[in-house]
Amino acid sequence: MTSNPVKPLDLDVAGFVLAGGRSSRMGSDKALVSLAGRPMITHALSVLRDAGLTAVIAGARSSLTQFAPVIADDSPDAGPLAGICSALASTPAEHAVFLSVDQPFVPPILIAYMLRHAFATRASITLASVNGVAQTFPAILDRAVLPHLRAALDSNRLGCFAAFESAAGSINRPLTVLPIELLAQCGVVQHDSAIPAPFWLSNVNTPADLARAEQWLTAGIA
């Protein structure tokens, strides 16, 4: 992902790539689809590792143990919220970073900045926004939200963003959203491949998305 890894973070953090989706729009497991000559799972893992984190995979439809340790979902058909709950339950770390396997363009320095912001502000959940719209991933979660996320999962309320908002309210600590365009304009974060900030959180969900991602990585964005 980058030739310039972020300085290792002296923080109590676990890193997880969420890879348990059905990939129905892609037609095959997104984690193993090739992007720029290597499986997409390796791009996501590299984002976390280059941000100074040890990376683990949360959920998997295919065997991914050759890439990193895998935490199985307790409820594999319940979507990413199930993977988040299983991952949080597996670690004693104070905070956890969650990145979707189909987000290969997130700059590691953005993860590092979000983490430091989360620790400084004691936010329960820290997200990023694009064009003023909060995005579900990447997400920095304080482990204190786990019981509340688990309650939402057990109640079959599976939407991650709604569960995040509810959990933050339940422990009376803020959910913070950082505007990535402003961070980029201020020079706080940047992308090694010069991909503009509005594209950093793009998802690669379909073959058309994959073709576009290949163009961005090889020829740049027109």
Image: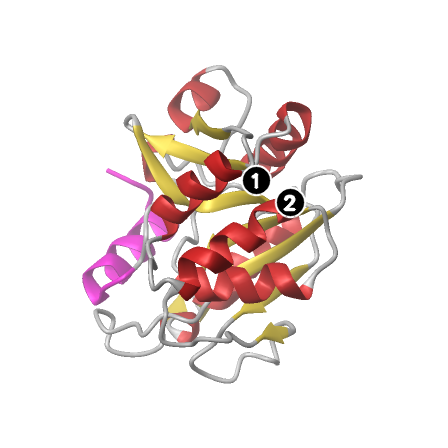
Q: Amino acid at mark 1?
A: Ile
The circle on residue 111 is: 1
Instruction: Kindly identify the residue that appears in the image at 24 percent across and 57 percent down.
Output: 209
| Main SS, magenta residues | helix
List x then y, in percent, for residue 198: 32, 33
* Position above or below: 197 against 69: above
Q: Is residue 216 magenta?
A: yes
Query: Quick one: 108 or 13, which is closer to the camera?
Result: 13
Q: Are marks 1 and 2 in contact (CB under 8 Å)?
A: yes
Image location (x, y in percent) of residue 185: 43, 17
Can you say which quadrant of the picture contains the C terminus?
A: top left
Residue 33 image point, x, y percent? 37, 73
Q: Which residue is mark 2?
A: 51
Q: Residue at x 64, y 29 (%)?
A: 122
Which mark, residue 184? none
Identify which residue, 84 or 42, lies in the foreground: 84
Residue 184, magenta (yes or no): no
Q: State which region is magenta.
A: 205-222
The quarter holding residue 58 reads bottom right
Q: Residue at x 63, y 55 (%)?
A: 15
